[in-house]
Image (tube, rainbow, N blue to C red):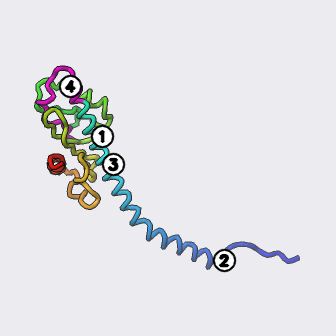
Amino acid sequence: MKTTKKGFTLIELIVVIAIIGVLAAILVPSMLGYVKKSKVSSANSTASTLQKAINTTLIEIDEQTQDSGSITRVHKDATVSSSRIVFDGTTTATGYDTKLKNYMEKASKIAFDSRCVGGACVAVAVALDSTYTGTAPSGVVTVDNYKSYSFSGTSNLSTALNAAALLASAS
């Protein structure tokens, strides 16, 4: 009785590996673009969520018969080891950071700066890490220009905030 062995030849295996290698060479660069786009989108989304949390906090402050209109800036500096969020422009800022943390869990873990006018937050810039910064309103930081806003200190965060404030005033 004759038995035949079934299996792949070495040539067939090499061809399959070569095809997989070509597909990987094509797909990896395009997938890296998706990762960048996703991280920029995530940073912008975080900034938008933070803006909503700040606005909700300002409404709560105003409801407690305190003047939220005097608050011009809410920020947390990444260089400070404390997780305290600072409300500038008011003398009675105690407890405001706790209110904000109730609405935005990440608020004490990220560096951010915001501009408030008349008791409403109009623009926010957030640094998720050293590379990705996001703004609200979005449209300032994109996949094409995210490196120019990468967080290397408060200067680039301020630049992103100024651009977002300019965008907010234009709309």
Instruction: Please tell me in which quadrant of the rendered image residue 29 appears.
Output: bottom left
Instruction: Give me the C-alpha separation between circle 1 and circle 2.
Output: 57 Å
Picture disc at residue 61: 4
Picture disc at residue 9: 2
**Farthest top residue in view:** 65
Vertical arrangement, residue 18 with respect to residue 52, above or below = below
**Farthest right residue in view:** 1
Picture disc at residue 49: 1
**Farthest bottom residue in view:** 11
Q: Amino acid at mark 3?
A: Ser
The local secondary structure at tag 3 comes to: helix
Extent of the magenta region:
57-79
Ranked by sequence position, the earlier of labels 2 and 3 is 2
Ranked by sequence position, the earlier of labels 3 and 4 is 3
Picture disc at residue 66: none
Residue 42: x %, y % from top left: 33, 48
The residue mark sitting in front, 1 or 3, is 1
The residue mark sitting in front, 2 or 3, is 3
Report which residue position mark 3 lands on.
Answer: 42
Residue 122: x %, y % from top left: 18, 41
Q: Residues within 10 Å of mark 1 (few under 14, many from 20)?
A: some
Q: Amino acid at mark 2?
A: Thr
- Residue visible at 21% across and 54% down in the picture: 149
Vertical arrangement, residue 95 with respect to residue 131, above or below = above
Instruction: Give me the C-alpha separation between circle 4 and circle 2.
Output: 75 Å
Q: Is residue 131 magenta?
A: no
Front residue of 104/20: it is: 104
The residue mark sitting in front, 1 or 2, is 1
Q: Is residue 73 magenta?
A: yes
Q: Amino acid at mark 4?
A: Ile
Q: Amino acid at mark 1?
A: Thr
